Every structure is written in structure tokens, then in C-alpha cells.
């Protein structure tokens, strides 16, 4: 079964870095504190609950990919699920868990690097540094926000086969 992914346009690519223009999207989001690796599991319970029917209409909402995670300035993490494109803020049921909020992501340019493997902080950090170096070498783009970690596969996928990305917002 195909899982919906956010819509984007490929603007440019070189080596293993792409610049993409992501279209506006709705995110279900929660803020969690703790260890880099553990917060994903903690957040998934909250966000998964929402899409599995813990909302005011008991509606089940299709799972999408990726699950994204970014660190806020206070050290907590924002973990998000993209909502299926057919939905708007008005058509989505309200969460019953106050820790889950609905957020509109505006159209955004991201520089992106994709990598395979597990979900360790070391792999993420290595690829974030590679992406930052690539952006610094791009004369037409500059960093415009904090990095986002995108995980596309479920935990039961062997780590060797997992697809991950680091996305950093950029502007011309």
C-alpha cells in the first residue's frame, strides 16, 4: 500500500543534495522533551493516537510519511505527521489530546540530503553537517531555519534499509 508523502518541486540538485520547494501542508504536531532517540517514540504515541481515532469525531486518518523531528530553542523537540493533502485545517477533527496541535506549514524551500540506515543521533548529525557544508558552498542559497529530521520507514523495517533525510530551510 502506497503511503502519501508531502508534495514538492525539485528546484535543483548536485551530488547528493537537492533543493526542493515544499507546498503548503497541514501538520499534526506535538512537543516532547527528552533524549534525541526516545522523543520519537514518545511523540508517536500521541500523534499516532490522533490519526488512529483519538479525536473529537473518532475519525481514522491515513498515515503519511515522513515523520519529522526538529529541536526547538528550549531544547524540546517538535515531532510532526503530515496530514493527507485532501484535508484542510477546517476538515480535520480536533485532537482530544491537548498535547497534539494542528499547524499550517507554509510553502518552504528546503535543502535536503537523503541517507540510509538507522536512527542514531550520530548518523543524523553526520548528515546534518554534510548538508550545512553543501549549503555553505551554494552561492544562490542561505540557511533560513533549523534542521528537520525526516524518517520514512516504520520501526520494524531493518535499520539497514531505512530511508531518512535531513532538511534545512533555505532562501535565495
Image: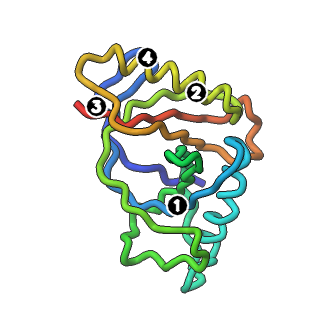
Neighbours of disc 2 within 10 Å: few (<14), some (14-19), many (20+): some
- Give the number of marks: 4
Q: Is residue 129 left or right of residue 171?
A: right
Q: Tell me the tag on residue 11.
A: 3
Q: Are marks 2 and 4 in contact (CB under 8 Å)?
A: no
Query: How would you rate the neighbour count of disc 3 (Cα within 10 Å): few for under 14, some for 14-19, many for 20 or more?
Result: few
Q: How is the image coloured?
A: rainbow
Mark 4 → mark 1, Cα distance in angstroms: 29 Å
Q: Is residue 160 above or below residue 156?
A: above
Q: Earlier in the sequence, mark 4 or mark 1?
A: 1
Q: Which mark is residue 29?
A: 1
Mark 3 vs 2, N-terminal side = 3
Question: Which comes sooner in the sequence, label 1 or label 2?
Answer: 1
The residue carrying pointer 4 sits among few (fewer than 14), some (14 to 19) or many (20 or more) residues within 10 Å by Cα, namely few
What residue did someone put label 2 on?
A: 115
Residue drawn at (27%, 25%) of the image: 141
Residue sitting at x 67%, y 26%: 122
> As rendered, which of 108 and 31 lies closer to the eye?
31
Q: Considering only order in the chain, which callout, 3 or 1, is on the residue closer to the N terminus?
A: 3
Q: Which residue is mark 4?
A: 133
**15 in relation to 28, above or below:** above
Q: Quadrant of the N terminus?
A: bottom right
Q: Nearer the viewer, mark 1 or mark 3?
A: 1
Quarter of the figure that contains the C terminus: top left
Q: Earlier in the sequence, mark 2 or mark 4?
A: 2
Residue at figure coordinates x 57%, y 58% from the top left: 31
Are dots 4 and 3 in contact, CB under 8 Å?
no
Q: Look at discs 1 and 2 and give the one toward the viewer.
A: 1
3D distance between C-alphas at marks 2 and 4: 16 Å
Disc 4 from disc 3: Cα separation = 19 Å
Tell me if residue 85 comes above or below residue 37 in the rendering.
Answer: below
Amino acid at each position: 500500500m502506497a503511503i502519501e508523502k508531502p508534495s514538492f518541486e525539485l528546484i535543483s540538485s548536485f551530488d547528493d543534495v537537492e533543493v526542493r520547494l515544499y507546498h503548503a501542508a497541514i501538520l499534526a504536531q506535538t512537543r516532547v522533551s527528552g533524549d534525541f532517540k526516545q522523543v520519537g517514540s514518545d511523540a508517536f504515541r500521541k500523534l499516532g493516537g490522533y490519526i488512529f481515532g483519538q479525536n473529537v469525531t473518532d475519525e481514522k486518518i491515513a498515515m503519511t510519511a515522513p515523520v519529522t523531528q526538529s529541536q526547538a530553542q528550549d531544547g524540546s523537540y517538535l515531532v510532526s505527521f503530515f496530514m493527507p493533502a485532501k484535508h484542510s485545517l477546517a476538515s480535520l477533527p480536533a485532537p482530544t489530546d491537548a498535547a497534539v496541535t494542528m499547524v499550517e506549514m507554509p510553502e518552504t524551500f528546503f535543502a535536503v540530503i537523503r541517507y540510509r540506515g538507522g536512527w542514531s543521533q550520530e548518523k543524523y548529525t553526520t548528515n546534518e553537517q554534510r548538508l550545512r557544508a553543501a549549503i555553505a558552498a551554494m552561492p544562490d542559497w542561505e540557511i533560513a531555519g533549523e534542521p528537520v529530521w525526516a524518517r520514512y520507514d516504520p520501526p520494524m523495517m531493518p535499520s539497514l534499509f531505512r530511508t531518512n533525510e535531513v532538511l534545512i530551510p533555505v532562501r535565495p
